[in-house]
Structures are given as structure tokens and as C-alpha cells.
Amino acid sequence: MILSSKIIGSGFNNLIVLHGFLGMANNWTSYAKKISSSGFKVHLINLRNHGNSFHSSEFSYDLMANDLSDYVNEHRLKNFSLLGHSMGGKIAMKYSLLFPNKVEHLIVVDILPIYYKSNLRLITKALKSLDLLKIKNRIQADYLLSHEIENKSMRSFLLKNLSKNEENKFYFKCNLDILHKKVFEVEKMIYLDQSFDGKVLFIKGENSDYINEKDLDQTKEIFPNLKFKIIKNAAHWVHAENPAQFLKNTHSFLKN
């Protein structure tokens, strides 16, 4: 099956964007509209078990890298730039190493190919605790979720997964049961037994702790041409928290 996507722009240069865990293509619409004005055709991907893409009981970085390969072949993309945030960044790294001749520029946002211990299972558990049959509107859903998740921006991000069916009842677009069950797959290290000699930019949010100097130095052994940029006044969701600087730095890199 082929991943669903939202394509913005009609430029000659293709840019594929991969979202993070519990995200979706629509999270990147604002960025895509801005960068597409510089001659890019932007493919905002919905990864398996996310957004409008197919649901599967299987979920791993190897599978998602192959999903991307299937999408690239379906759309007959010879060369393109690849941007991935968080989980999407790990997929982007994996794909670039498997298919190095396809990727002209690689942008990895606030993630390294290492193991991360996370609280993602607590987040999926909180979402699963919502009784969707009793929820009448998004305000109520937000209120109920606030008992488990204090951060309002995080709740807003998560509740974008809510949609309504033909009976006007809420449901989750993402395959929440499988994502909850397989959340440990997201934390896993990416096993890399080769290197990628292309152009690479790693971006870190100034207030994020996802990237540390020691592990970044080790990552440079796999990506020898790695450039590193810290975006001020931003944490893990760099593109949302400082969109102007994120756009400026990615645009400059992609046009080089």
C-alpha cells in the first residue's frame, strides 16, 4: 500500500517531509506553503498508522523506510531532498543510508539515531483513556485530556488526530491501539552499518535536550558532511516554535 500525502507547490525540486510520532502531514502545511514559493514541490507524508495513511499491525523503522521507498517509486521521484522531524528524522536517516543516491539534501530535526527513553506510552495511554462515544466536542476532549497532560500546546497537537465519522462520532485517525502497543519501536536506535556522504543538516531546538554533543560527534562518523544548527527560542517542535528561523535555515541549506 502507498502512503497518503498532501502535495503543495509545483516546483522542479521535490522535498519530502516526514512528521513525528502522533503527527500527520497537516502539521507541516504552513511550512510547506512558504518553502514551496521558492521552487519546491513539497510532499507532506502521512506515515503508516498516522493521518490518512493505511493502518497496519506492524510498525518499525525498517518498514517505514520501505514505505517511503514505495512512495518514491509510485511518484517516480528520481532525486529529492528529505526532511524528517523526531521519529520522521530517524526514518529519514534510515532511508538515506539505504538509498543514498536518491537524497540530494537530508535535514534531520531534533533527533539522533540513538535509543531514547521516553514518556510516549503515557501519552498514548492518556489518549486511550478518552471515552470518544461520550465526547461531544473538542473543548470537552481537551478538558478531559488536561487531567493527564498539562501542556495545552501538546494537547492541541495530539487532538488533531480526532476526526468525525459519518455518524458524527469522534474517532482517532491514527491507529492508536497499535501505536500504544508498539511505542517502544519509536524509542529504538537506528542501526547504521554504512555512511551517507551527501549534504546533511541537523537542527536542534535551543531548549531541547534531544541532541547532546557526545552522541552528535558519533553521528558525524555516519554523516561526515553533517552541518549543525541550533535554533534559538525553540524546543523539540522547532518548526512550530520558531518558524521564521526554521524556514530561513532550511531554505538556505536546500538552496546550497
Image (cartoon, rainbow, N blue to C red):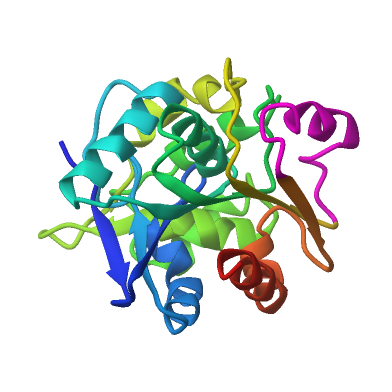
Q: Residue furthest bottom?
A: 37
Using the image, determine if residue 211 lies above or below residue 160: above
Q: Does the image show residue 116?
A: yes
Where is residue 114? Give x, y as percent: 69, 25
| Displayed quadrant of residue 137 | bottom left
Where is residue 194? Give x, y as percent: 57, 20
Asked whether, in this view, residue 7 is left or right of residue 246, the answer is left
Using the image, determine if residue 53 lies above or below residue 44: above
Residue span colored magenta: 207-225
At 88% across and 29% down in the image, what residue appears? 214
Give 67 or 196, whichever is nearer the viewer: 196
Is 222 within the magenta?
A: yes
Q: In which quarter of the image is the N terminus?
A: top left
At 33% across and 50% down in the image, what residue appears? 46
Where is residue 45? Give x, y as percent: 35, 53
At 78% across and 51% down in the image, what residue appears? 228
Q: Main secondary structure of the magenta part?
A: loop
Q: Does the image show residue 48?
A: no
Q: How many discs appear? A: 0
Asked whether, in this view, residue 188 is left or right of residue 54, the answer is right
Q: In which quarter of the image is the C terminus?
A: bottom right
At 67% across and 69% down in the image, what residue appears? 246
Give 167 or 1, whichever is nearer the viewer: 1
Asked whether, in this view, residue 14 is left or right of residue 92, the answer is left
| Displayed quadrant of residue 99 | top left
Is 224 within the magenta?
A: yes
Using the image, determine if residue 14 lies above or below residue 92: below
Give 58 or 79, whichever is nearer the viewer: 79
Where is residue 181? Give x, y as percent: 43, 21
